[in-house]
Amino acid sequence: MSMSLLKGHFVRHIGAILNSIYKWLYSPNVDSMHIWGILCRSRPPIGPSGENNFIMYHRNNGHASEILNKNNHVLSLTESEVYLVECDNDVYDVSRHSFFYNAIFDEAILVKSIRLEDFLTYVESLEYPKVEVLFLWNIGRCGSTMLAACFEALDDCVSISEPDDMFAPWLRKDVYGSKTYERLLEATLKYHLYQIMLRKPQTKLVLIKPYSYGFWYAVECREMQRFHHLFMYRDLEPFVISAAIFEKVLGKSKRHSLFAKVVGFEKIINEGVKSLISATEQFCPDKAKEIDNILENEMSFLNCMSGIGTALLYYIYTQLIYHDRINLIAVKYEDVRQNVIAVFKQLLDHIKRDVNEEEMLQVLHSTKKDSQKNTALSSFNKDKQVNERILCRYKFAIKVLKTLDLEYMCHEGAKLPKTISL
């Protein structure tokens, strides 16, 4: 195990112990805020961080309404508290931070904690920000970070890649109860838009790129009908190769392994698997057991692969609920790579957004950059030493997942989004 992983494991354990003591000593009162200084921090190479990734000391107190000041961002949510970080630098600058959870962790100068109910009350009191929102749903390992960077190249667009706080409530859905859970879904989104408009008031479009298994959000958040939606996917075999490269970053790890626990993936892996099995049992019951066996026995990167089935099945579920009222179209990675200008113009037409020639040149330039710069994935994107043995190794997984693939389902007559075509 590397020294960085050992350090992260140590910091999380010490942080968890200290935070348990702090919660006993400094339980937040109504409208109060605890402000914490940072002594040490350590985050995983991939994935979000929480309050336990910091070793902190109690600095002073404040008022909960201070969350409405600029430069505050939600770090994590517990059953009763919200942890925020104060960041002076621009956490929405994707040229410096490919993922939002990395940005707020790296740029944090202070940590703050308030009651969950106070957070909800203050955010709900705000006027809803006047800005267009575009969700970029995706299967994972499909170029969605690159496409988000294309939108970021537009002068009046801000891109948020994988804002963990918007999707974390799902992991505690049963604990929160349905009413608080629904309030959290709407409040975390609204708070992001509010903070963006404080920092960048000229913004007209906010693109949000969720996790690959985050499509359930579109089903359960009542605000979804007012926004635009894209769904991004790619051919299955190149996707598997990309996921196998991703596996090199994670290391070979089964769902319940020590490695999965150390790097904090066990819960996310299990939740991702649970979401796929739940959706499969509802829509493809004959495949549920087969897929469960694969996910139990294959490596942890298959959690990323499970995003294919989860996203597609939840898309159908969404359509059944909303009766086509969600404004959603699909885009394929291979089409974007073939002619980014033509595809991107069609995407902008979908959201009724004009673009000038200078902006299109910026968009084209953005596709030539490393969209995952400064992350553990960056160097692996350049790894071309992947051969047929990868596809052979995962041929059973590919066979089953093909039954959930977008184009397969199109041939079967499933109700799926209109796909941008050249």
Image (spheres, rainbow, N blue to C red):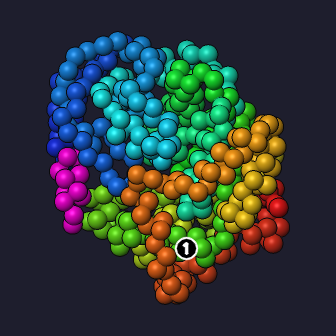
- The quadrant holding residue 40 is top left
Residue 133 placement, left or right of 18: right
At label 1, which amino acid type do we have? Val
Q: Position of residue 390 (x, y in %)?
A: 49, 82
Q: Decide: few, some or many residues near mark 1? Use Cα within 10 Å; few <14, some 14-19, many ≥20.
A: many
Residue 166 falls within the magenta-colored stretch: no
Is residue 7 magenta-colored?
yes
The vertical placement of 178 against 121, above or below, is below
The C terminus, quarter of image: bottom right
**Which range of residues does the magenta coloring cover?**
1-12
Q: Residue at x 48, y 80 (%)?
A: 386
Q: Nearer the viewer, residue 145 or 134?
A: 145
Residue found 42% across the figure and 13% down from its top: 65
Q: Position of residue 106 (x, y in %)?
A: 34, 40
Above/below status of 251 relative to 275 = below
Give the residue at mark 1. Answer: 240
